[in-house]
Image (tube, rainbow, N blue to C red):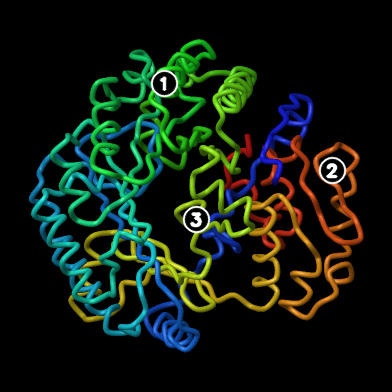
Amino acid sequence: MMDQSIKFDLDLINRYDKAGPRYTSYPTALELHEGFGDKEYRRHIAKSNAAGGPLSLYFHIPFCDTVCFYCACNKIITKNRKHAEPYLANLYKEIAMLGDLFDSNRVVNQLHWGGGTPTFLSYEQMKQLMVVTRQHFLLKDDDSGEYSIEVDPRETHSQTIKQLRELGFNRISLGLQDFDPAVQKAVNRIQSEEQTFSVLEAARAEGFRSTNIDLIYGLPLQTVATFSNTLDKILAAEPDRFSIFNYAHMPTRFKTQRQIKDADMPSADVKLDILQMVGQKLTEAGYVYIGMDHFAKPDDELAIAQREGKLYRNFQGYSTHSDCDLIGLGITSIGRVGDAYIQNVKELDEYDQLISQNKLPVFKGFELDEDDKIRRAVITQLICHFDLTYATIEQEFAINFADYFAKELHALAPMQSDGLLTVSEKGIHVLPAGRLLIRNICMVFDKYLAQKQQQFSRVI
C-alpha cells in the first residue's frame, strides 16, 4: 500500500516558501505565445487524430451573478441572464467546428463545465448545450464517463441538481471558501450553511458519484479558530474530496482583489498555522493527501488512481484520464491536443469575430519539443505520485536519466539533506515532509522558470 501521508515541518516550509507554478501543465501557460493560431491548431488536431484515443472536453461558462473579491478567474459579472444567449450561440458554432475536425469515433471519457458559474445558465440553456455537444462529439450514455460541473450553492437547489444528473453529470464541485460571516462579508460571498449542505445532500440523493468542496485559506479576517470551525462543519457532512487552496493576493494583477483591505489579510504565520490545522484535521478524519491542495477519501477515484500509479494532472487539476487529449471550448479555455497547448481568446468581442469568420478562436498556443515532453513526464510523475523511476522515463524517451538530468540531480542534493526526498540509482522518492513542497521539487526540472518566477504565487 502506497504511503499517502504528509509531514508538516514549519522550518522547512518557511525556508522553501517561494513563488512557483502549480504545474497544471508543463511548460506552464505563461509560455503560450501569439505565434500559434488557427492553422497550427488544425495541424495538431490532425496529429491527435492519427494517434487516436479518447477525448476530454472543457467548457468555460464565464458568467457570474455577483463578484467574489478574491477571484482571479476570467469571468463576466452580470445579473442579466440574457447575456449568455449570444455567447452560447457562438459556443455551439465552436463545438460544431471542432466536432468536424476531430474523428467522430473518439469517445469523450471526460467532460467538465467550469467558470465563472456554469449554473448561471437556465436549465433549457444547459440542456441545449449538452444536446449540441452530443450532436458533434461521441458522449457516453451509460454513466461511465467522468462528467463534472462546478456549482454555486447560492443559486443551486434540489431541482437544479436533479436536472444536472439527468443531463449526464455524475461529479459535482461546490464552491464555498469559508462559512465565517465576517470573512464572507470581506470577500463579498454571502453563503449559508443551509444553502451549501442542501446542495450536497441533493447531489448524493441523485446519485452523483463524487462530491467536492472548494475552500480557500488565507482570506481576509481568517484565523485558525474560524477556519477550523468551517472545516468541522463540512467534515461532519463527509464530502468525497476537498480542494483547499492558498489564496494568492495579487491586487496589482487582479482588479477585484483591490476591494480587499490589506490590513485584514492574515499574516504568513497564521496562514501556516491554518494549513497545519487543515492537514491534521483531514488526516485524522481519514482523508489522504493527493497533492497540491487536494484531499480525498481513500476509496475515491483520485486516491485509488494515485495508489495504482494512474493519476494525471491537467488544466482542471488532478485527473484519472491521462490518455485523453483535452479540448478547451469557450473564451479563455485552455486545451492540450497533439503535442501542443492551445488557449482561446479572452474577450467576447474577439470570440464573436473569429467564430463569425469560421476560424477557431485561438489566442495563443505552444508546441512542445522533445525536451519539453521529457520534462513534462518527469514533473507529472513527481507531482502525481511523489515517486519517479528513471527506467520509466529512459524507456519512453531513449535517454540516460542520470546524464540528461545531471545538473538537476545535483540541485536536488540540498533537498535530500533536508529530508524532502531521497535520490537513489533507480529513482527519486518524495518523503512525507516533501509532499507539501512538491512544487519546489518540480521547479528543479523547469527550464523556463528563472525568468518567469515573479509571476507565480507562493507555493505555501
Task: Using the numbered discs, state the Cα–Cα distance from disc 3 to disc 1 in whole angstroms.
Answer: 26 Å
Which tag, 3 or 1, sits closer to the chain's start? 1
The residue under label 1 is which amino acid type? Ala
- Measured as percent of width and height from the top left, residue 206 is found at 23, 42
- Measured as percent of width and height from the top left, residue 110 is found at 38, 62
| 55 sits to left or right of 318 | left
- Under circle 1, the secondary element is loop
Q: Residues within 10 Å of mark 1 (few under 14, many from 20)?
A: few
Residue 309, label in figure: none
Kindly indicate the quadrant of the structure image that contains residue 41: bottom left
Compare residues 321 and 67 and report the one nearer the observer: 321
- Which residue does the image show at 19% across and 36% down from the upper left? 156
| 154 sits to left or right of 319 | left
Task: Using the numbered discs, state the Cα–Cα distance from disc 2 to disc 1 in whole angstroms.
Answer: 38 Å
- Measured as percent of width and height from the top left, residue 182 is found at 36, 13
- Under circle 3, the secondary element is strand
- Under circle 2, the secondary element is helix
- Measured as percent of width and height from the top left, residue 197 is found at 29, 26
The residue under label 2 is which amino acid type? Met
Residue linked to disc 3? 319
Residue 415, label in figure: 2
Kindly indicate the quadrant of the structure image that contains residue 213: top left
Camera-near label (3 vs 2) is 3
| 256 sits to left or right of 226 | left
Residue linked to disc 1? 236
Compare residues 442 and 5 and report the one nearer the observer: 5
Camera-near label (2 vs 1) is 1
